Image: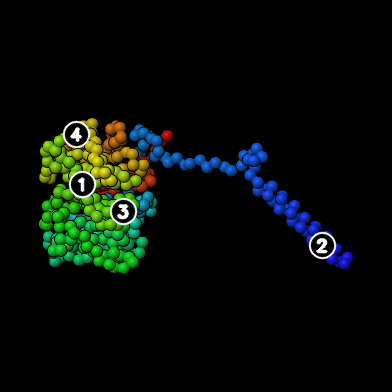
């Protein structure tokens, strides 16, 4: 009996201690603001991008530095990371044979992906980190009209042929999981998916087909949106917006050279997506090439609305690139000829929302350089073609924002 009493008392003591512990824990966890105090959690302060809320004058461009040289020409295709640039290097005179390479601007090492005849620009697939290109057989096909459509992974180096006997344009499909090119006989874009299965895909394209053989102006160029979901392909007849996931094609009218539908229709020479994919900067012309007349347009791909950017003085624009925040546009263009008859290049930084321009002097000692260029995704570098007679070269210019 006494033993049971001790057990009962012991149970009460243990229970009481657990109750006190539980009440203490509740008091500890109870929000302190109910007691008139504020929780001491730190308030995170958002990191302001150096490109936010700046003016044209706050962007500083450094001295150009030669980073890569060669005996023949280079073509800058695009940055594929903050340190890597996809380039096309001529391997034989005349640009008939070349190599697709990745140039690391930090290490200055070059990685060759392929060598052959790829003189029509490869397409970069940002979703799958792959290069898609047309590989021509110059030995048995002169002039070359048909090609193999090749998919090459940048990470593994693996190559796959997605279609044979096709030509431009090259189109990504299924959100970048495969690619197509134009089959002249079928009058359709034809190719395959790479993953998970090599399923064939076809999209009718006969009404947009370019003429073969292709004098300059008929040949299709292309630009893929930053997220890989959209793509524009364009030549002197068509400007097409493609949904790479659904395979749908929409033709966009770039208007005419004069207001009210007057004059010749405008067509695109160059098109560049903004970093957020909401705008496309377009360099357009009209009529037949060579033609120094240039129109500078901004296209909203969702609505098809066009905005024409008026420049302060005549300017035959060659190249356009967006700044990292998608607010400014850097352009190069022709302003005059020097005594030897070579074109003098001028660079301008433009704010399309205000129309303000800033003239740059990127190559003080040689204004003939820098016609083609690309701006790194983080905005810290420009890579420019600084080829001179007898020496092919690429230059890097550092870029800073000064607050």
Residue farthest to the front? Answer: 1
Residue farthest to the right? Answer: 2
Which residue is at a point 36% across and 37% down the rendered structure image?
60
**Residue highlighted by disc 1:** 252
Can you tell which quarter of the image residue 119 is in?
Answer: bottom left
Which residue is at a point 11% across and 43% down the rendered structure image?
287
Question: Image check: 6 left or right of 152?
Answer: right
Can you tell which quarter of the image residue 101 is in?
Answer: bottom left
Element carrying mark 2: helix
Element carrying mark 1: loop
Cβ–Cβ under 8 Å for marks 2 and 4: no
State the image coordinates of residue 312 (x, y, percent, origin top left): 23, 31
Looking at the image, tell me whether mark 1 or mark 3 is earlier in sequence order: 3
Which residue is at a point 24% across and 64% down the rendered structure image?
201
State the image coordinates of residue 69 (x, y, percent, origin top left): 28, 51
Image quadrant where one finds the C terminus:
top left
**Residue 8: image tag:** 2
Taking 296 as reference, is 112 above or below it? Answer: below
How far is the residue under mark 2 from the one under mark 4? 101 Å
Question: Image check: 80 left or right of 265?
Answer: right
**Residue highlighted by disc 3:** 229
How far is the residue under mark 1 from the one under mark 4? 26 Å
- Disc 1 vs disc 4: which is toward the camera? 1
Element carrying mark 4: loop
**Residue highlighted by disc 4:** 314
How far is the residue under mark 3 from the one under mark 2? 73 Å
């Amino acid at each position: 009996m006494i033993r049971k009493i001790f057990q009962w008392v012991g149970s009460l003591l243990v229970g009481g201690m657990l109750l006190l512990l539980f009440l203490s824990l509740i008091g500890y966890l109870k929000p302190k603001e109910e007691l008139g105090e504020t929780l001491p959690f730190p308030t995170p302060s958002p990191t302001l991008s150096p490109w936010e809320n700046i003016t044209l004058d706050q962007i500083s461009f450094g001295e150009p530095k030669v980073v890569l040289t060669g005996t023949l020409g280079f073509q800058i295709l695009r940055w594929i990371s903050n340190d890597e640039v996809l380039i096309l290097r001529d391997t034989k005179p005349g640009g008939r044979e070349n190599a697709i390479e990745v140039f690391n601007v930090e290490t200055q090492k070059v990685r060759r992906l392929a060598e052959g005849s790829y003189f029509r620009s490869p397409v970069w697939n940002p979703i799958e980190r792959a290069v898609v290109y047309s590989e021509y057989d110059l030995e048995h096909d002169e002039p070359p009209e048909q090609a193999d459509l090749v998919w090459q992974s940048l990470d593994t180096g693996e190559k796959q042929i997605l279609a044979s006997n096709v030509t431009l344009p090259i189109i990504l499909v299924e959100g970048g999981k495969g690619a197509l090119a134009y089959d002249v006989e079928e009058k359709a874009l034809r190719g395959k998916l790479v993953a998970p299965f090599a399923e064939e895909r076809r999209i009718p394209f006969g009404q947009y087909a370019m003429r073969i053989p292709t004098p300059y102006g008929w040949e299709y160029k292309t630009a893929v949106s930053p997220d890989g979901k959209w793509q524009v392909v364009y030549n002197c007849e068509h400007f097409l917006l493609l949904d790479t996931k659904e395979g749908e094609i929409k033709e966009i009218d770039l208007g005419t050279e004069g207001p009210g539908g007057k004059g010749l229709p405008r067509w695109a020479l160059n098109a560049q997506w903004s970093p957020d994919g909401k705008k496309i900067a377009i360099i357009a012309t009209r009529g037949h090439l060579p033609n120094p007349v240039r129109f500078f347009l901004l296209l909203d791909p969702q609505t098809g609305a066009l905005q024409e950017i008026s420049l302060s003085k005549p300017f035959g624009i060659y190249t356009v690139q967006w700044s990292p925040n998608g607010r400014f546009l850097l352009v190069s263009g022709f302003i005059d000829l020097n005594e030897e008859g070579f074109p003098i290049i001028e660079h301008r930084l433009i704010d399309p929302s205000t129309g303000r321009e800033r003239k740059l002097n990127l190559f003080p000692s040689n204004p003939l350089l820098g016609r083609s260029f690309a701006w790194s995704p983080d905005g810290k570098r420009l890579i420019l073609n600084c080829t001179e007679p007898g020496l092919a070269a690429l230059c890097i210019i550092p870029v800073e924002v000064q607050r």
